[in-house]
Amino acid sequence: MAGVQPNDDDKRRLYQDYFRWEQVVVVGPLVQAAIDEFHWELARWFCRRPWVWFSYFRVGKALVFRDFTDAEERTEKGLAAFDWAARKGWDKIEANLLSNPLFPKSAQAPVFGGQIQPSAAEFSPDAATLP
């Protein structure tokens, strides 16, 4: 990937590999631990079925979960969000992120369009380690 701008298929493969690893190793255990803390069954039911909306989604479009503890469903929805972003255009997604007042100022460097281009090795599931 060095010196070559990856196409959307390459970006999706990289995203999918990292996202699957993250869902199993990081997110899954944390979500399950949080759900286990709910002793009121109605609250647990609602927490397992969130709807997620990103500012780049069109009005009326959201990720609606049947069971947020299911890593495969989180991955499926995450890939759908990626595909929607790719269709909208990475330059528009970047502008959307940078205009968000909640987006950390330290992260406001050109990410999608230019200078910061991580290598595939940096996001390889084999290369990642947890503290």
Image: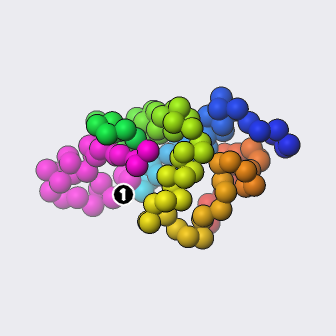
Label 1: which secondary element:
helix
Residue at x 73% of width, y 55% of height: 116
**Quadrant location of residue 65?**
top left
Task: Say above or below: 73 vs 33.
Answer: above
Q: Is residue 118 magenta?
A: no
Q: Quadrant of residue 7?
A: top right
Residue 30 visible in the shown view: yes
| 11 over 50 or under it: above or below | above
Instruction: Count how many numbered circles sit on residues in the image.
Output: 1
Instruction: Say which quadrant the C terminus sits in.
Output: bottom right
Image point 23% across, 58% down: which residue?
38
Which residue is nearer to you in this view: 46 or 11? Answer: 11
Seen at 60% across and 64% down, the residue is: 108
Identify the residue position indicated by label 1 in the image.
Answer: 33
Q: Residues within 10 Å of mark 1 (few under 14, many from 20)?
A: few
Left or right of 83, for residue 61: left
- Amino acid, disc 1: Ala
Between 114 and 107, the one nearer to me in the picture: 114
Find the magenta span and give its range: 31-56
